[in-house]
């Protein structure tokens, strides 16, 4: 079934046409520059790659040399988790993370457990927030890494990373944050937040799929770790023209546009969500899952209490929303995020995530509301 309204920007976003236009000249891996030699071709590749590296660095407040391109956030996550574990094995094997992390982080942890790692999983409260006292009490002399997501992909909940960073560093550990949902949406500086390692991916903020970036800070992390990750990613081992130049160019411009238009996007999308929630919460039995104070401005995870998941799916799937299960369809397992927040299986399955973007309109919001009114609450 063809979707005519996309309300699942936290899963993926349409590519901005300006980004596509910038990518086109580099869309062929063997793109040619008139009158150029192989040397000139690689010089041109280097130029656009370094420009993109600067654009990514500018978005998150890092230095250019602290950015490494990856194929995705998942690759970056695995590079970080495995590299830190191997690099700091002499110090310990203990890692702290959160029960509501993205499956990519949880799977990486499972893989490390098979290698001998000890993993502690932080609980969250009904709002999706961790307890800082619990975090403090989990540290041991063997704790080498703490992985805490910046913004949750299902609820939009923002963890207090500045305070988390202070606790992590006071315990001589490294802080890694999966920022795939936060980057491009909210303004932050990795140095100000005290983040040592961080990943982003282009298709979450109107850039291309198949490209991401990893930030490896030099202030609080060992330079050897950066070299280890860089070698593992093979970025420096490929000839420049075999890099995914078009995707790198697209990621760079998407970062630049997101940074330049962030406040306008915030204002526009916040108004859309406010209207959506105002209209939805008029229906009895509905509630917002997670913190309404500490969350992304584009995300609204709504529990349609008492409504069957199949009913919600049949009405809302044409809008591309995400349901309260382990995938976008009728899955067997309820969302691990919602379950970790104390929700029942029934309420988790009856929950829907609306994640809005800059291309959505108030007319689209009205169409969704009318569909719910006519087909679910008639």
Image (cartoon, grey):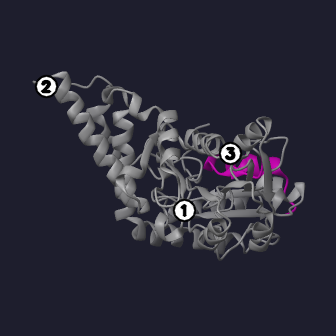
Report which residue position mark 1 lands on: 195
Please state which of the two labelled residues, at mark 2 or mark 3, is closer to the viewer: 3
> In this orientation, which residue lies closer to the viewer: 26 or 36?
36
Q: Is residue 262 above or below residue 226?
A: below
Q: Is residue 141 left or right of residue 228?
A: right
Tell me if label 1 and label 3 are in contact, CB under 8 Å: no
> In this orientation, which residue lies closer to the viewer: 233 or 225?
225
**Which secondary structure lies at badge 3?**
loop
Which label belongs to residue 359? Answer: none
Highlighted range, magenta: 305-325
Report which residue position mark 3 lands on: 90
**Which secondary structure lies at badge 2?**
loop
Tell me if label 2 and label 3 are in contact, CB under 8 Å: no
> In this orientation, which residue lies closer to the viewer: 62 or 223?
223
Q: Is residue 263 above or below residue 359?
A: below
Picture quarter with the C terminus: bottom right
Report which residue position mark 2 lands on: 36
Residue 375 spot, x, y in % from top left: 74, 56
Q: Is residue 244 left or right of residue 332?
A: left
User: Marks 2/1: CA distance?
Assistant: 42 Å
Q: Is residue 276 above or below residue 65?
A: below
Looking at the image, is mark 2 or mark 1 earlier in the sequence? 2
Residue 254 spot, x, y in % from top left: 38, 51
Residue at x-position 61% and y-position 61%: 151
Q: Is residue 264 left or right of residue 125?
A: left
Mark 1, other Cα within 10 Å: few <14 / some 14–19 / many ≥20: many
Could you tell me if residue 21 is visible in this image? no
**Which secondary structure lies at badge 1?**
loop
User: Marks 2/3: CA distance?
Assistant: 50 Å
């Amino acid at each position: 079934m063809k979707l005519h309204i996309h309300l699942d920007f936290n899963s993926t976003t349409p590519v901005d046409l300006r980004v596509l236009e910038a990518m086109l000249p580099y869309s062929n891996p063997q793109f040619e520059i008139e009158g150029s030699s192989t040397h000139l071709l690689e010089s041109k590749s280097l130029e656009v790659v370094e420009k993109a590296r600067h654009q990514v660095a500018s978005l998150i407040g890092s230095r250019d040399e602290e950015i490494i391109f990856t194929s995705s956030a998942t690759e970056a996550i695995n590079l970080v988790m495995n590299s830190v574990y191997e690099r700091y094995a002499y110090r310990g094997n203990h890692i702290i993370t959160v029960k509501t992390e993205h499956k990519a982080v949880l799977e990486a942890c499972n893989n490390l457990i098979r290698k001998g790692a000890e993993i502690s999983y932080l609980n969250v409260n009904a709002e999706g927030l961790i307890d800082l006292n619990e975090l403090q009490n989990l540290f041991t002399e063997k704790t080498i890494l703490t992985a805490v997501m910046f913004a949750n992909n299902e609820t939009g909940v923002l963890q207090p990373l500045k305070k988390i960073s202070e606790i992590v560093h006071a315990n001589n550990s490294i802080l890694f944050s999966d920022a795939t949902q936060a980057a491009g949406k909210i303004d932050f500086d990795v140095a100000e937040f005290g983040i040592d390692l961080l990943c982003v991916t282009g298709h979450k903020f109107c850039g291309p799929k198949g490209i991401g970036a990893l930030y490896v800070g030099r202030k609080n992390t060992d330079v050897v770790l950066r070299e280890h990750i860089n070698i593992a990613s093979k970025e420096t081992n490929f000839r420049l023209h075999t890099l995914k130049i078009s995707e790198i160019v697209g990621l760079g411009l998407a970062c630049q546009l997101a940074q330049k238009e962030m406040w306008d996007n915030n204002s526009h999308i916040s108004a859309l969500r406010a209207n959506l929630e105002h209209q939805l919460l008029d229906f009895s039995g509905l509630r917002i899952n997670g913190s309404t104070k500490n969350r992304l401005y584009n995300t609204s995870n709504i529990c349609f209490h008492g409504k069957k998941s199949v009913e919600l799916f049949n009405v809302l799937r044409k809008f591309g929303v995400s349901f309260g299960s382990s995938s976008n369809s009728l899955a067997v397992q309820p969302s691990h995020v919602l379950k970790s927040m104390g929700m029942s299986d029934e309420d988790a399955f009856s929950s829907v995530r609306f994640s809005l973007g800059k291309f959505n309109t108030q007319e689209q919001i009205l169409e969704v509301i009318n569909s719910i009114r006519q087909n679910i609450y008639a």
